[in-house]
Image (cartoon, coloured by chain):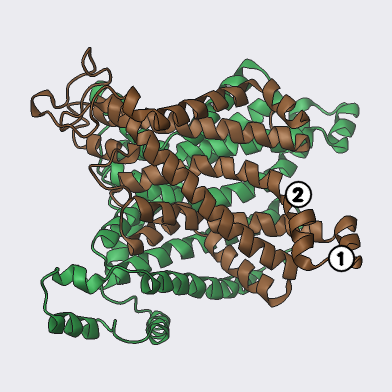
C-alpha cells in the first residue's frame, strides 16, 4: 500500500516536470513579451535589455527551464514580477479559497449526480428520469459564468436570499459552489444512470433476484458496488474540470482563489506567478487521481494495488 | 443510409439539428436579419428594457442586443468551425502517425498527449491564449490546439485497432504501400467516430470561446461575441439584468443544438453505444 503510494508519487514527478516544460515552452515559442508589456511601448532598448537580463529572460530556453526546475527542487517558486512578492506567498494566500470552493462543488456534484443517476436507472423512462435527463442536457450546455450571473439575479437581486459575491460565511459559498457543480452534476448523473443500468442487466443481478434477495439489497450490495468503478473514474476527471471551472466561477463571484490569481497573472503577463499557479493545479490533479486509484482497491478487491 | 433513418427517428437529435440550422441561418443572413447596426451606439437609449424598438433591449452603450446576438452567431460559428478543423487536422496527423508507425514515436506522442489531457481544459486554453494574446484568430488557435490531444488519442485508438484487422493485413501482404493502406482502408473507418467527435467538440469549442471572451482573453470589443456581451452586461447586472442574461441564452441554445446532434449521430452511427435506451 505504502509502496504503491510512493511509486505513484514518484511517477507524478516526470508528469509535473513535463507540465512545466510544456507551459514554459509555450511561453517561449509564442509572441508577446512580458518585458515590453511591463515597460510600455516607449521604453528604450537598453531598459528592455536590462530588465530582461535582471529577470533572467535573456538566457536560452533550456537553461531557464533547468534553472526553474533547480529552484523548484529547493522549494523556491520564484518571485512574482508584478507583485514583487514570493510566488509561494501569493499561492498560499489563494489556494484555501479554491480548495473550499471545489470540494463543496465536488460534494454537491457527487451526491446530487449519483442519487439522481441511480433513481433514473432504477425507474428508467419514468417522469423523474425524463426530467433528470432533460436537466442534465441543459446542465451540459449552460456556460457556467452565465449560470452564475442568472443565479445572482434570481437569488440575490430578486429574492434577496444570498449575497452577490465575496467570501465570509457559508451563505457566500452556496451560489458559487452550486454554479460550479452544475455541469458535473449533469455528467455524473448521465454516467451513473448508464453504469447502473449496465450492471442491473448482469447475470449475477438476475441470480440474486431469482434467489429472492430484496431489491434494496440487490441494488446496494450487487449493483452499486460494481457501478461505482466507472463513476469514480469520472469523479476524478470531473475534479480536474472543476478546477478549470473555478477560474470562471471565482471571477463571477469575486472569490479570492487561485483561478482569479491566474487570470490576474495572465493579464499582467506575470509568467512566474502563472507557472506557479499552473503547477499547483497540476499537482492537485495528480493527488486527486491517486486518491481515485486508491479507492478502486477499496471498492473492488480484484483490483490489486501492485500495478 | 440506415444511419440517417436512425437519426431521423431520434426526436431530440432533430430538435438539435433545427437549432444548428437556425444558428447557421442567423450567421449567414445576419445583415438582413439584424434590424439595427450591431455597433451603433446610442447613449440616450443605453440599457433600454426589451420593447418595441429593441426587442431584447439595449446594452450599456445603447446597442441593440438582438442585432448583436445575431452577429455574435458569426463569431461563435467561425471560431467553432475553424478550431474543429485545427483539432481534426492536428489530431489526425499525430494520431495516425503514432498509431500506424508505433515504436518510440507512439510513446513520445502519447506521453505528451496524456500530460495535456490531464490538464483541466480551460487552464490549457488560458495558458495558450495568455501567450498568444487575445483576439479572434488567437482564440480560435487556442481552442483548436486544446482539441488536438483528445482527437489524437481517439484517432490513434481506432488506427491501432484497424491495423490489426484482417483486411488491412491482407492489403499489406499484397504489397500495398503504407499511404495507400491508410487512405483506402484505415481512414474511411476512422471517419464516423471523427464526425461524432467533431460535432460534440463544436459544442465545447463554442463554450470555450465564450468563456475566454468572458474573461476578457478572447474576442475583443467592439466585435459582437456572446461571451464578451455577457461580460459587458455583468457590470450593469444589478440595474439591467437583461444585458448579461440574454446573450448567455444564445450560447446555451447553440451548445445544446450541437450536443443533441452529436448524441444523435453517435447513436445513429454506432447503435451499440446507444445512450437513449
The image position of residue B174, as x and y in percent, is 91, 65
| Image quadrant assignment for residue B201 | top right
Residue A259 drawn above or below residue A10: above
| Chain to which the residue tagged by mark 1 belongs | B
| Image quadrant assignment for residue B32 | top left
- Residues B240 and B144: in front is B144
- Residues B233 and B90: in front is B90
Marker disc for residue B172: 1
Crowding at mark 1 (Cα within 10 Å: few <14, some 14-19, many 20+): some
| Image quadrant assignment for residue B269 | top right
Residue at the (27%, 71%) spot, across then down: A33
Depth check, mark 1 against mark 2: the one in front is 1
Left or right? Give the position of A13 relative to B171.
left
What color is chain B drawn in? brown
Query: What residue occupies the far top of the structure in this picture?
Result: B52
Residue B63 drawn above or below residue A294: above
| Chain to which the residue tagged by mark 2 belongs | B
The answer for how far apart the CA atoms under marks 1 and 2 are is 17 Å
What chain is the green one?
A
The image position of residue B16, as x and y in percent, is 55, 27
Q: Earlier in the sequence, mark 1 or mark 2?
A: 1
Residue at the (46%, 71%) spot, across then down: A22
Q: Secondary structure at mark 1?
A: helix
Which image quarter is the N terminus of chain A in? bottom right
Q: Secondary structure at mark 2?
A: helix
Left or right? Give the position of B60 relative to A149.
left
Question: Which residue is disc 2 drawn over?
Answer: B189
Res. A104 visible in picture: no
Residue at the (37%, 53%) spot, across then down: B137
Query: What residue occupies the far left of the structure in this picture?
Result: B44
Which image quarter is the C terminus of chain A in? bottom right
Residue at the (27%, 42%) spot, across then down: B223
Amino acid at each position: 500500500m505504502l509502496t504503491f503510494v510512493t511509486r505513484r508519487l514518484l511517477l507524478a514527478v516526470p508528469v509535473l516536470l513535463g507540465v512545466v516544460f510544456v507551459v514554459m515552452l509555450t511561453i517561449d515559442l509564442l509572441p508577446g513579451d512580458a518585458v515590453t508589456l511591463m515597460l510600455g511601448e516607449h521604453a528604450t532598448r537598453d531598459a528592455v535589455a536590462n530588465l530582461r537580463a535582471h529577470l533572467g529572460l535573456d538566457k536560452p530556453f533550456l537553461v531557464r527551464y533547468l534553472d526553474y526546475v533547480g529552484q523548484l527542487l529547493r522549494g523556491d517558486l520564484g518571485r512574482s514580477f508584478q507583485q514583487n512578492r514570493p510566488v509561494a506567498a501569493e499561492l498560499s494566500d489563494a489556494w484555501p479559497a479554491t480548495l473550499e470552493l471545489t470540494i463543496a462543488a465536488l460534494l454537491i456534484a457527487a451526491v446530487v449526480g449519483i442519487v439522481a443517476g441511480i433513481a433514473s436507472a432504477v425507474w428508467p423512462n419514468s417522469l423523474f428520469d425524463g426530467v433528470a435527463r432533460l436537466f442534465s442536457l441543459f446542465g451540459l450546455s449552460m456556460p457556467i459564468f452565465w449560470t452564475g450571473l442568472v443565479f445572482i439575479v434570481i437569488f440575490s437581486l430578486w429574492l434577496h436570499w444570498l449575497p452577490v459575491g465575496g467570501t465570509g460565511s457559508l451563505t457566500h459559498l452556496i451560489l458559487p459552489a452550486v454554479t460550479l457543480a452544475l455541469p458535473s452534476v449533469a455528467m455524473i448523473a448521465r454516467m451513473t444512470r448508464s453504469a447502473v443500468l449496465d450492471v442491473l442487466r448482469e447475470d449475477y443481478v438476475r441470480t440474486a433476484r431469482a434467489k429472492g434477495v430484496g431489491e434494496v439489497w440487490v441494488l446496494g450490495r450487487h449493483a452499486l458496488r460494481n457501478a461505482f468503478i466507472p463513476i469514480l473514474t469520472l469523479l476524478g476527471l470531473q475534479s480536474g474540470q472543476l478546477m478549470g471551472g473555478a477560474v470562471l466561477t471565482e471571477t463571477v463571484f469575486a472569490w479570492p482563489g487561485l483561478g482569479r490569481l491566474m487570470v490576474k497573472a495572465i493579464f499582467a503577463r506575470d509568467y512566474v506567478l502563472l507557472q506557479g499557479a499552473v503547477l499547483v493545479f497540476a499537482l492537485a490533479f495528480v493527488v486527486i487521481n491517486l486518491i481515485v486509484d486508491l479507492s478502486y482497491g477499496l471498492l473492488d478487491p480484484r483490483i490489486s494495488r501492485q500495478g | 443510409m440506415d444511419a440517417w433513418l436512425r437519426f431521423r427517428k431520434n426526436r431530440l437529435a432533430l430538435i438539435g439539428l433545427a437549432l444548428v440550422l437556425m444558428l447557421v441561418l442567423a450567421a449567414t443572413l445576419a445583415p438582413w436579419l439584424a434590424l439595427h447596426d450591431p455597433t451603433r451606439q446610442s447613449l440616450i437609449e443605453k440599457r433600454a428594457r426589451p420593447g418595441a424598438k429593441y426587442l431584447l433591449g439595449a446594452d450599456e452603450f445603447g446597442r441593440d442586443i438582438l442585432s448583436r446576438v445575431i452577429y455574435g452567431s458569426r463569431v461563435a460559428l467561425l471560431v467553432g468551425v475553424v478550431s474543429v478543423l485545427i483539432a481534426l487536422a492536428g489530431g489526425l496527423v499525430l494520431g495516425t502517425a503514432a498509431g500506424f508507425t508505433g515504436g518510440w514515436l507512439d510513446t513520445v506522442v502519447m506521453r505528451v498527449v496524456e500530460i495535456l489531457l490531464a490538464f483541466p481544459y480551460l487552464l490549457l486554453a488560458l495558458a495558450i491564449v495568455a501567450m498568444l494574446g487575445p483576439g479572434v484568430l488567437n482564440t480560435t488557435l487556442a481552442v483548436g490546439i486544446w482539441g488536438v490531444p483528445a482527437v489524437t488519442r481517439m484517432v490513434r485508438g481506432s488506427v491501432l485497432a484497424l491495423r490489426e484487422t484482417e483486411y488491412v493485413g491482407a492489403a499489406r501482404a499484397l504489397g500495398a504501400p503504407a499511404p495507400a493502406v491508410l487512405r483506402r482502408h484505415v481512414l474511411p473507418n476512422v471517419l464516423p467516430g471523427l464526425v461524432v467527435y467533431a460535432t460534440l467538440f463544436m459544442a465545447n469549442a463554442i463554450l470555450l470561446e465564450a468563456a475566454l471572451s468572458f474573461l476578457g482573453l478572447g474576442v475583443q470589443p467592439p466585435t459582437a461575441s456572446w461571451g464578451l456581451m455577457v461580460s459587458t452586461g455583468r457590470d450593469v447586472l444589478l440595474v439591467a439584468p437583461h444585458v448579461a442574461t440574454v446573450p448567455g441564452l444564445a450560447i446555451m441554445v447553440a451548445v445544446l443544438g450541437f450536443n443533441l446532434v452529436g448524441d444523435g449521430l453517435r447513436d445513429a452511427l454506432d447503435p451499440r453505444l446507444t445512450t437513449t435506451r
